[in-house]
Amino acid sequence: MDTFFRDKVIIVTGASSGIGLAAARLFGQAGAKVVMAARSYEKMKELAPSVGPDVLCVRTDVSVEGDCRRLVQETMARFGRIDILVNNAGLSMRAMFKDLDLSVLHRLMDVNFWGTVYCTKYALPALLASKGSVVGVISVAGYSALPARSGYSASKYAVRGFLDTLRIEHLKDGLHVLVFAPGYTESNVRNAALTADGSPQGETPLEEDKLMSAETCAQYLAEALRKRRNAVTLTGLGKATVLAHNLFPNLTDRLTYDFIAKEKDSPFQ
């Protein structure tokens, strides 16, 4: 793995915590030149020494097209190339659609879908030149919908459709496109998840310490990049859910409803 990533220029969005930070550290320790992108610039600067010796931090709100353009421009100015773009920045939600302020759906699509589109659009010429990789970190919810996560599931379905299309368009010119779907992974995403009025819920309904670690997830991501896989779904539950959704959709709907209904403070209650 060290040889594969050595000297590659890798942009990771959402790099200040969770899967993004774990991936940035893994790539940096493997000898890559890492570009950390997130809104929390000061936090990234503090974390940069733990990532590696050649790190560029760029304050980036991926929902802002101009920020994504500047991210790519600063990367090219510093390193002159881009080998891998990891679209990891994301936002979740937890509320029934009937109770939801529509601004929450707009926010989810702006960050999860448009953030991926913007970054990919501006990085694409450099990625085509390097025959590099573009990654979309989605979710099992991008294959099999989760209730009370309408905006989250919709945005992740949209990212998957966008990237699958991009892969076909560039089938003959060496671009690698990976749709990477973690299952439940330990992170801050559920604490920051938006509620019906757009405020963060502040507390996760899951036992985070019993979930896959962000570091383990990053290792799977690195392996998928090295093997230039098209799609990866993680965890036994995640793989079983996707398979069941394809084969037994009605049963999967009922099982998913029952699963979410058992969550702490479930929106169904």
Image (cartoon, helix red, strand yellow):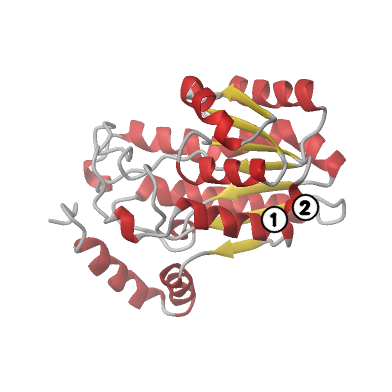
- Is 221 situated left or right of 183 in this image? right
Q: Answer yes or no: do the residues labelled 1 and 2 have beta carbons within 8 Å?
A: yes
Residue depicted at 59% across the width and 48% down the height: 136
Q: Which residue is mark 1?
A: 225
The three-letter amino acid code for the residue at tag 2 is Phe
Mark 1 Cα within 10 Å, few/some/many (few <14, many 20+)? many
Instruction: Check disc 2: other Cα within 10 Å, few if <14, some if 14-19, many if 20+.
Output: some
Marks 1 and 2 sit apart, C-alpha to C-alpha, by 9 Å
Lateral position of residue 155 relative to residue 76, left or right: left
Residue 231 percent location from the top left of the image: 63, 62
Q: Residue 129's spot in the image, x, y percent?
A: 87, 39
Q: Which kind of residue does numbered mark 1 sit on?
A: Leu
Q: Position of residue 196 (x, y in %)?
A: 24, 38
Q: Quadrant of the C terminus?
A: bottom left
Quarter the N terminus occupies: bottom right
Q: Please, what secondary structure does the residue beneath circle 2 have?
A: helix
| 85 shown above or below 156 | above
Please state which of residues 218 and 243 is positioned toward the viewer in this rendering.
218
Q: Residue at x 54, y 64 (%)?
A: 233
Task: Identify whether 63 is placed above or below 6.
Answer: above
* Left or right of residue 248, residue 89 in this image: right
- In the picture, the disc for residue 4 is 2
Judge from the rendering whether residue 240 lies leftward or rightward of residue 194; answer left or right.
right
First in residue order: circle 1 vs circle 2: 2
Residue placed most toward the observer, 225 or 245: 225
Res. 62 visible in picture: no
Q: Judging from the image, what secondary structure is the residue with disc 1 in?
A: helix
In the depicted structure, whether residue 33 falls above or below residue 152: above
